[in-house]
């Protein structure tokens, strides 16, 4: 007579323990991920603490980025008007510059200036940036017009490249005035 073995009971106990351990590990890992994501999200919500010189430099960096985007757009318009560039390439180039202006805008709008001087400079930078955005977006609309789009003066789109270049030059002058104010 043989005694019955109990391997099934042990296996069930081991399986239950393994399942419990796995569940605990998964729960701990999930909790760690949630805590990490929450701390990362909340860390970006804190106000930056900068010295006045750092804030002025941050404004100047953003304005230089915008100035470069305006200069690149200006060159693109001149090349397209001269027949040295095709409209799809010009559109892509200007679209890239709109992305640069977006980065500059993000830098200026998220900056918390620590003093009145850097705050006033940021306000000037935002105003000059708004003018630059208008000029670059208008230049892109002009490119669409030259490519045969149904855009024209009734929709506020310039049809003369000189008007586009003039608007870009005016925006560049405003940006450079802010850079001069920032000491660059």
Image (spheres, rainbow, N blue to C red):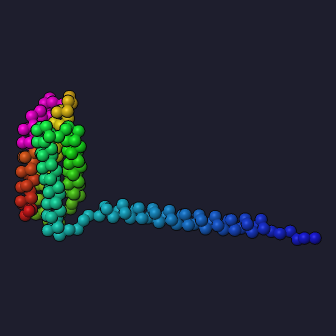
Up-down: is 69 above or below 88?
below
**Residue in front for this viewpoint, 115 or 96:** 96
Up-down: is 68 above or below 37?
above
Query: Where is residue 65 shown, x and y percent of the image?
Result: 17, 55
Query: Where is residue 61 shown, x and y percent of the image?
Result: 16, 60
Quadrant housing residue 17? bottom right
- Whether residue 126 is visible here, answered yes or no, is no
The residue at the point 73 percent across, 66 percent down is: 11
Bounds of the magenta segment:
151-167
- Whether residue 40 is visible here, answered yes or no, is yes
**Residue in front for this viewpoint, 22 or 97:** 97
The residue at the point 23 percent across, 48 percent down is: 96
Quadrant housing residue 92? top left
Query: Where is residue 85 shown, x and y percent of the image?
Result: 17, 40
**Residue in front for this viewpoint, 46 or 53:** 53
The residue at the point 75 percent across, 69 percent down is: 10
The residue at the point 61 percent across, 68 percent down is: 21
Tally of numbered tags: 0
* Quarter of the picture holding the N terminus: bottom right
* Quarter of the picture holding the C terminus: bottom left
Is residue 20 located in the magenta-colored stretch of the structure? no
Query: Where is residue 162 shown, x and y percent of the image?
Result: 7, 38
Q: Is residue 98 left or right of residue 174?
A: right
Is residue 158 located in the magenta-colored stretch of the structure? yes
**Residue in front for this viewpoint, 143 or 111:** 143
Quadrant housing residue 111? bottom left
Up-down: is 170 above or below 61?
above
Residue lying at the far front of the rendered structure: 84
């Amino acid at each position: 007579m043989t005694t019955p073995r109990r391997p099934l009971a042990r296996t069930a106990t081991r399986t239950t323990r393994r399942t419990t351990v796995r569940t605990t590990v998964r729960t701990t890992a999930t909790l760690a991920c949630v805590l990490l994501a929450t701390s990362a999200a909340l860390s970006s919500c804190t106000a930056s603490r900068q010295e006045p010189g750092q804030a002025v430099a941050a404004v100047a960096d953003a304005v230089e980025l915008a100035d470069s985007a305006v200069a690149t757009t200006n060159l693109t318009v001149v090349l397209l008007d001269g027949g040295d560039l095709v409209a799809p390439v010009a559109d892509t180039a200007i679209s890239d510059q709109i992305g640069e202006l977006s980065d500059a805008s993000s830098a200026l709008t998220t900056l918390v200036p620590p003093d009145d001087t850097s705050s006033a400079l940021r306000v000037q930078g935002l105003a000059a940036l708004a003018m630059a955005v208008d000029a670059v977006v208008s230049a892109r609309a002009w490119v669409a017009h030259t490519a045969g789009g149904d855009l024209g003066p009734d929709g506020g789109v310039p049809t003369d490249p000189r008007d586009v270049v003039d608007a870009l030059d005016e925006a560049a002058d405003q940006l450079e005035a802010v850079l001069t104010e920032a000491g660059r």
